[in-house]
Image (cartoon, helix red, strand yellow):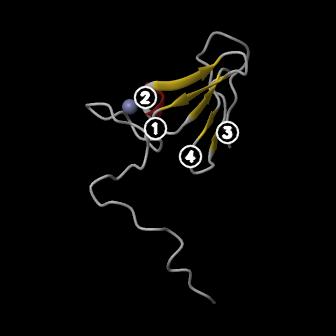
Amino acid sequence: MTTASSRRTQTTPQRKNPSMCQHQPACPSADSTDREAAHLVAHYPEQGWSLLCNGVLFFEDTGELLPDGQIIAPHRPLGTEHVVTAA
Ligand SMILES: [Zn+2]
């Protein structure tokens, strides 16, 4: 078994979240459940997505792509169609 001890480069200790956010107070980080509350830094309605200052790509169907590559399934508020349940 091999050990990969240096898979992450060191970041500045004072900034936990290496994001573009320079707001005060800081916006929710990408791994926060509140991540959608971050500010928009780019909006491409014709392509159907927005970029939040915490690095999250937010799609108009409410799906999300996190900076670490994690995909959040669309989670529309109730009222339309069916609710998708994850196992
Ligand atoms: Zn921000």
Label 1 to label 4: alpha-carbon separation: 8 Å
Q: Position of residue 16 (x, y in %)?
A: 34, 53
Name the residue type under label 3: Ala
For marks 2 and 3, give the one nearer the viewer. Answer: 2
Q: In screen coordinates, is 51 left or right of 31?
A: right
Name the residue type under label 1: Asn
Tag 4 residue = 67
User: Closer to the N terminus: mark 2 or mark 1?
Assistant: 2
Please tell me which residue is depicted at 56% across the width and 80% down the height of the picture.
4
| Mark identifier at residue 38 | 2
User: Is disc 2's CB within 8 Å of ligand 1?
Assistant: yes
Label 1 to label 3: alpha-carbon separation: 25 Å
Mark 2 and mark 3 in contact? Answer it, CB < 8 Å. Answer: no
Q: Position of residue 64 (x, y in %)?
A: 61, 34
Quarter holding ligand 1: top left
Q: Quadrant of residue 81?
A: top right
Q: Quadrant of residue 3?
A: bottom right
Q: How packed is label 4: few (under 14 Cα within 10 Å), some, or many (20 or more)?
A: some
Q: Position of residue 32 (x, y in %)?
A: 43, 40
Mark 1 and mark 4 in contact? Answer it, CB < 8 Å. Answer: yes
Disc tally is 4
User: Closer to the N terminus: mark 2 or mark 4?
Assistant: 2
Tag 1 residue = 54
Tag 3 residue = 86
Label 2 to label 3: alpha-carbon separation: 25 Å
Eyeballing the image, is 87 above or below 16? above
Label 3 to label 4: alpha-carbon separation: 22 Å
The residue sitting at the bottom extreme is 1
User: Is disc 1's CB within 8 Å of ligand 1?
Assistant: yes
Label 2 to label 1: alpha-carbon separation: 7 Å
Viewer-proximal residue among 3 and 52: 52
